[in-house]
Amino acid sequence: MNDAPDSPRAQGILHRVYGYTDFLPLQEEVISHMLSGGDAIAVMPTGGGKSACFQIPAMMRPGVGVVVSPLIALMQDQVSALVQAGARADFLNSSLGLGEERRVRERLLSGETDLLYVAPERLMTPGCLELFSRVSVALIAMDEAHCVSQWGHDFRPEYLRLAELPERFPGVPRMALTATADPFTRKDMKERLGLGQAREFVGDLDRKNIFYQVVVKDRARERLFSFIQDEHPGQSGIVYCMTRKKVDQTAAWLAGKGLPAMGYHAGMDARDRQEAQRRFRHEDGLIMVATVAFGLGIDKPDVRFVAHLDLPHSLEQYYQETGRAGRDGLPATAWTAYSLGDAVAVRTLQDRSQVDEAFRLVQKRRLDSILGYCETSRCRRQVLLEHFGQSLSEPCGNCDVCRDGVRSWDGTVAAQKALSCVYRTGQMFGAAYLTDVLLGNSTERMVRFGHDKVSTFGIGEELDRKGWMSVFRQLVAAGYLKVDLESKAGFSLCEESWPVLRGEKKVPLREDPAPPVRQRRTRTGIGSVASEPHVVLEGPAQELWERLRTWRRETAVEKEVPPYVIFHDRTLKEVAARRPASLLELAEIPGLGEKKLALYGRTLLALVAGEEDV
């Protein structure tokens, strides 16, 4: 399939293999640059078509395209999808038996492979390097390249050795790809991978189909259950928790409520983790409850929601994890529960950090950013994009702030009372105790300390307990209160506290919204994805969609691949909506390349016609 590089050829491969007529933004420019032999750094959102940027040049340049990928499951999915589409692709990893690995090597040496996926650990072994020295290498693509950066939350030391590749393969163009990289991470990637002359391609990072929502963490598991039942019943999703214990408890609790939930974390047996990943990839409607150990390279396109029961440590981590929802471009939700405890945890992490000053400053900026995102009264999408150096001229209309609005109030006096209460009680207590003092709720402990006699006792009756907890949370998030590590997360004043106490600085606070009344919401108008039109099926079209899904599931089981490797939801929904009556009409549907049309075209037409025996 290797041919002379030219744009019409690339367009032809796009249509023949992938079933699309038009490139996505930046794809054509990146492909052209790689075909000319240039190095590149590509930062494009999940679902933005990064893979085609190296797959198409690898099919066109002489030799084999070497793809460095961090996870076995990701390699298997991508190679399965390529083979289903008619491309010549293989992978080398520990899942292969001796016979399978020998056949992969034979195909590579005989020139029958255009793309070979390999893990960084395997690639840099003497045996693998010797193997690639015997063939022509068309290009080297390093996927999930943020893993090389010390600033990245997925730092993997084995990626560092990839900087040796230019010496091993001089003149071979290289590409580093990621969906998540702020300017610090991009600079680090460039230096650590020896890509100083690489051209940077940074796409529009706005995932328009994702609805962003942050709720106050009050009865969080119950709110999560209601969210899933009301918004995404029967759909696949990921729920992130901070600890293994919380993963196990949450998965068991959701399963006890009748939801198909299972857990995943690094403390599980390797075979159990592998089985959990297999089930998530192959089964519809499964909910994976996991730590950050799950998700890097997840290629499942129909994840309809990503929920966080604990706050990520940075907007980079948040963007990466929420980006695993809605890869197919259909509506999805990023739901986050956030509390005072999260704000305290983030500030504690910041203060305990034993790093050099440069790293500390970057880490502080990132921690401040995730807290600011949760507490913002602005459009969340605008705040998120600004963090990555991009902008959105108008509010998005597709986040909770845009949909519901946020009321702000002058919290200066309340802040002064709260800060004064911290000071008067000795700068050693947390929010619950301080709230009791402000509300005048005398306890035996309080009497013992004499805090029922301090000047701030009972001066906060204008707010209820939830109101004061919100005030303390926002003061911690904004940096007006310090978490005192010596007193088990009690509060103490800091430099930023005094201008507020002296009346030199105003403190605007946001009013926490009340939990919504349970009702299933359909996304139209505010909260819809106006710029990402999607197919809405009703009546006979919905019935056809269900028949198509059943057929896809049975076909996937027969071929031992995930259902989305056969067809994405988006393609099958187009079939259900358009009801094509001929192969010519079927060929006009995006996502149907030549091989898939030959393999499945007549079966799809029979299903559309309502024939039972297909």
Image: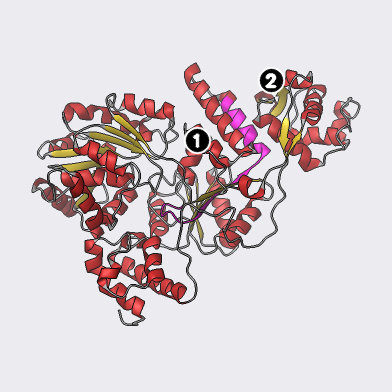
* Kind of residue sitting beneath label 1: Ser
If the image is split into quadrants, where does the C terminus sit?
bottom left
Q: Earlier in the sequence, mark 2 or mark 1?
A: 1
**330 part of magenta stretch:** yes
Up the image or down, 447 lies above or below 531; here it is above
| Quarter of the rendering containing residue 99 | bottom left
Percent x, y for residue 540? 45, 77
Residue 56 badge = none
Query: Which residue is at the far bottom?
Result: 612
Looking at the image, residue 474 sits to the left or right of residue 543; the answer is right
| Residue at 54% in and 41% down | 381
Query: Which residue is at the far right?
Result: 453
Q: Which residue is mark 1?
A: 391
Asked if marks 2 and 1 touch (Cβ < 8 Å), the reply is no
Looking at the image, residue 165 sits to the left or right of residue 329; the answer is left
| Residue at 18% in and 50% down | 101
- 288 and 375: which is toward the camera: 375
Percent x, y for residue 343? 63, 34
Disc 2 crowd, CA 10 A, few/some/many (<14, 14-19, 20+):
some
- 6 and 439: which is toward the camera: 6
Q: Which residue is mark 2?
A: 496
Disc nearest the viewer among 2 and 1: 1
- 501 and 287: which is toward the camera: 501
- In this picture the colour scheme is secondary structure
> From which residue to which does the magenta span run?
326-350
Up the image or down, 84 lies above or below 110; here it is below
